[in-house]
Image (tube, rainbow, N blue to C red):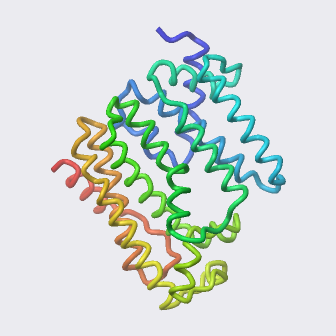
Amino acid sequence: MIEPHIRQAYAHCLRLARNHYENFPVASWLLPRRLRQPVAAIYAFARRADDLADEGDFPAHERLAALDAMEQSVRASARGEPGDDPVFIALADSIQRHALPLEPFLDLLSAFRQDVTQVRYADFGELMQYCRRSANPVGRLLLHLYRAADARNLGHADAVCSALQLTNFLQDLHQDYVENGRVYIPQDEMRRFGVDEAQLGRREDSPALRQLLRFQTQRAMQILHSGAPLGKRLKGRAGFELRMIILGGNRILQYLQRQPDSFQRPRLTRRDRFNMVWGALK
């Protein structure tokens, strides 16, 4: 029996998740009912940290201090001392109830701190280290919730999450550059293909940029496919939803490879979604 104040804290997290456009795994009807509350708590935590990292005109030292305070709160939550913040009340209950490890939460905070201090990546290895902390922790936490966090599954989840993160970067080239001054394409590869990052700000397409992006999408697709066996290994709704997500990510990468405008954000059609459902059922 969940105590009333904990139930209210989960309700707060669910409202946050359902009101935000990036909540694809959170409010999904495919998610087992018993996991909707902890997933919402994880989402609310990550959403708050992400918002702090991108907090408008606040200076870097204030954003970093706010993220440090979040680390203290999540450590306290893991000890069962969440205070009166509903996000951390829900998170403390989820950590205890589902035996969630602390490390993924700390990795997420580390990545959000990096968003404040680093806006360029020298090479692909450096970018993947960022993905390891910014994307992979979510997949790892979900596997712990599914009670399927063995070494093989964690490795495949890391591949899927990193590939989806790379896909998001490729969809948001102009937005990341203009709004946050960030470039998530490795600097050495931009030089190799002869692409000037100022093109991203001007939305200036070119044959060199299209070649660079084809290289990026092909690599992201390979990484995504390397993690795809996890979709078959997970049972029930969890496996079905993961297969849907993988198929959707693959379709977006296909659009990014083929579309004539490098800055157009792909949109999945009704036919795409039907094919994703059909493919996930196989």
The residue at the point 34 percent across, 29 percent down is 147
Quadrant of residue 43 within the rendered picture: top right
Q: Position of residue 55 (x, y in %)?
A: 75, 51
Q: Position of residue 156 (x, y in %)?
A: 33, 49
Q: Position of residue 109 (x, y in %)?
A: 63, 43
- How many numbered badges does the structure rendering display? 0
The residue at the point 70 percent across, 30 percent down is 72
Relative to 163, residue 277 above or below: above
In front of the other: 253 or 223: 223
Q: Is residue 226 left or right of residue 112?
A: left
Relative to 197, residue 54 above or below: above
Q: Position of residue 214 (x, y in %)?
A: 41, 79
Q: Is residue 136 left or right of residue 204?
A: left
Quadrant of residue 238 within the rendered picture: top left
Quadrant of residue 252 within the rendered picture: bottom left
The residue at the point 69 percent across, 70 percent down is 178
The residue at the point 61 percent across, 14 percent down is 5
In front of the other: 125 or 84: 125
Q: Is residue 148 left or right of residue 78?
A: left
